[in-house]
């Protein structure tokens, strides 16, 4: 039976081919058969994890708690200099501060639970919470931007990285009201108990990608600078941190 | 714990004798200067089970006005502001001792006598079933909530 690799469903579509190349590289290096499963939604990925169909996952920070606490997954590595940060943006115009926003707010958001959680927290100083907003769920951040530009949403929650990658034409019409500087929340490679015997080897491979020509090329394709070791306490700390953000 | 040093204080100040845990007294000086919460940041610290600071992130250090080395190893009441009612912290410790999360609005004292308001969430760090310490994550409170707390805490301190 081959192992299964999954990546957080918030991957960028243009990086899928990079993840396939990553998987081919990984199989060769580990000398194990690994199948890359592309899950289109978090629900689909959670289902696969529940059915023990996932052995290695590049997980969203939001999922690390259930992976560790409920599924006994262990952390192996995290991307360097790639924290998940959020931006709240509105249409370029009169509003310059969160506190100037209308109280009954329409928010456009994408399928990125950690971004949406941070976004809600950044609205708190304006006394805006779940009870006084309307949410528009969008397929991706480009669609979030579109809702703002059309005036259908007052603000949008963006992954900072994705906001910065919007076209200049779109960005010019948006105003970032606030961006998070948390620097402690990030994706991570997590392993199932079944895959745990390969942990040390995998960790070494991931960490050394950034000093290997082929590795660097793959990192480039998946938009990551490199990986660094992530210990169990690092994951526990992030779980505690996320726990406070969800309350 | 050491008393505050008047030489560190910026501007006009008032002197208070704070009674801390186990009847320890600390002389503190307060000013009316408020430092705004840094927008988009979280202020994070961790303590051991006795409330001794073990970790502090950059925002925590910056907002406190102390050097990191002056904070690590100190009890967390180094930030205790005399305007905070003792009952709030009793509730914090009672809640943590039940292994539950505590949430509250806190006015903190800076090294320079100034203050800053936070919305704090404190949780026990449970590892292999044991409480190993506590983490506090603080975010920016709304002005409305701060104003409510100023009133409430003043009343609580009076009916003490
Ligand atoms: C993780 C953690 C964070 C804390 N953060 C603060 C804080 O920011 N400000 C504060 O006055 N007390 C804080 N406390 C509570 C202090 O330990 C202390 O109880 C409080 O300052 C009152 O002092 P006393 O208990 O000596 O009377 C914190 C406690 C813990 C466990």
Image: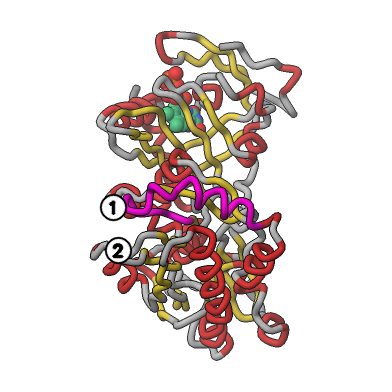
Q: Which mark is residue A204?
A: none
- 10 Å crowding of disc 2: few (<14), some (14-19), many (20+): some
In the visual, does A196 lie left or right of B117? left
Question: Which residue is rendered at x = 57% and y = 55% of the image?
Answer: A206
Q: Which residue is mark 2?
A: A49
The residue sitting at the bottom extreme is A150
Q: Is residue B42 above or below residue A213?
A: above
Chain of the residue that carries numbered disc 1 in the rendered image: A
Q: What residue do we see at 47% from left, 37% from top?
A: B106
- State the residue in front, A121 or B35: A121
Towards the viewer: B70 or A133: B70
Q: Position of residue A224 (x, y in %)?
A: 62, 63
Marks 1/2 same chain: yes
Residue A71, labelled with which disc?
A: 1
Q: Is residue B28 above or below residue A119?
A: above
Mark 1: secondary structure:
loop
Q: CA distance from mark 1 to mark 2?
A: 8 Å
Taking the image as four quarters, which one is ligand 1 found in?
top left
Residue B52's place in the image compared with A115, above or below, is above
Q: Quadrant of the N terminus of chain B?
A: top right
Q: Which residues are magenta?
A: A189-209
Of mark 1 and mark 2, the one earlier in the sequence is 2
Q: Depth check: A83 or A178 in front? A: A83
Residue at position x 40%, y 53% in the image: A191
Labels 1 & 2 near each other (Cβ < 8 A): yes
């Amino acid at each position: 039976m081959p192992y299964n690799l999954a990546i957080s469903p918030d991957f960028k579509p243009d990086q899928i081919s990079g993840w396939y190349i990553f998987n081919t590289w990984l199989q060769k290096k580990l000398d194990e058969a690994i199948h890359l499963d592309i899950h289109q939604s978090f629900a689909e990925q959670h289902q696969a994890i529940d059915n023990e169909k996932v052995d290695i996952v590049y997980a969203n920070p939001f999922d690390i708690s259930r992976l560790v606490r409920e599924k006994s997954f262990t952390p192996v590595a995290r991307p360097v200099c790639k924290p998940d940060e959020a931006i709240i943006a509105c249409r370029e115009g009169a509003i310059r501060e969160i506190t100037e926003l209308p109280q009954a707010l329409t928010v456009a958001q994408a399928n990125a639970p950690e971004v949406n959680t941070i976004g809600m927290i950044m609205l708190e100083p304006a006394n805006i919470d779940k009870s006084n907003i309307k949410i528009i769920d969008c397929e991706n951040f480009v669609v979030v931007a579109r809702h703002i530009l059309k005036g259908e949403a007052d603000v949008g929650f963006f992954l900072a990285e994705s906001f910065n990658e919007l076209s200049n034409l779109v960005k010019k019409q948006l105003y970032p009201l606030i961006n998070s500087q948390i620097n402690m929340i990030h994706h991570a490679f997590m392993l199932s108990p079944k895959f745990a015997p390969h942990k040390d080897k995998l960790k070494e491979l991931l960490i050394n990608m950034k000093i290997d020509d082929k590795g660097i090329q793959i990192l480039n394709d998946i938009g990551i600078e490199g990986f660094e070791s992530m210990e169990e306490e690092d994951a526990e700390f992030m779980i505690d941190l996320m726990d406070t953000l969800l309350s | 714990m050491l008393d505050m040093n008047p030489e560190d204080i910026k501007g006009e100040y008032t002197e208070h004798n704070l009674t801390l845990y186990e009847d320890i007294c600390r002389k503190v000086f307060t000013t009316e200067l408020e430092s705004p919460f840094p927008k988009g940041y979280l202020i994070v610290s961790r303590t051991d089970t006795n409330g001794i600071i073990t970790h502090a992130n950059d925002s925590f250090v910056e907002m406190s006005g102390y050097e990191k080395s002056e904070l690590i190893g100190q009890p967390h009441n180094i930030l205790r502001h005399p305007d905070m009612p003792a009952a709030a912290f009793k509730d914090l410790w009672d809640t943590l001792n039940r292994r539950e999360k505590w949430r509250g609005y806190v006015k903190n004292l800076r090294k320079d006598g100034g203050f800053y308001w936070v919305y704090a969430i404190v949780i026990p760090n449970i590892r292999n079933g044991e409480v190993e310490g506590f983490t506090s994550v603080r975010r920016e409170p709304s002005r409305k909530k701060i104003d409510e707390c100023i009133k409430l805490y003043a009343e609580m301190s009076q009916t003490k």
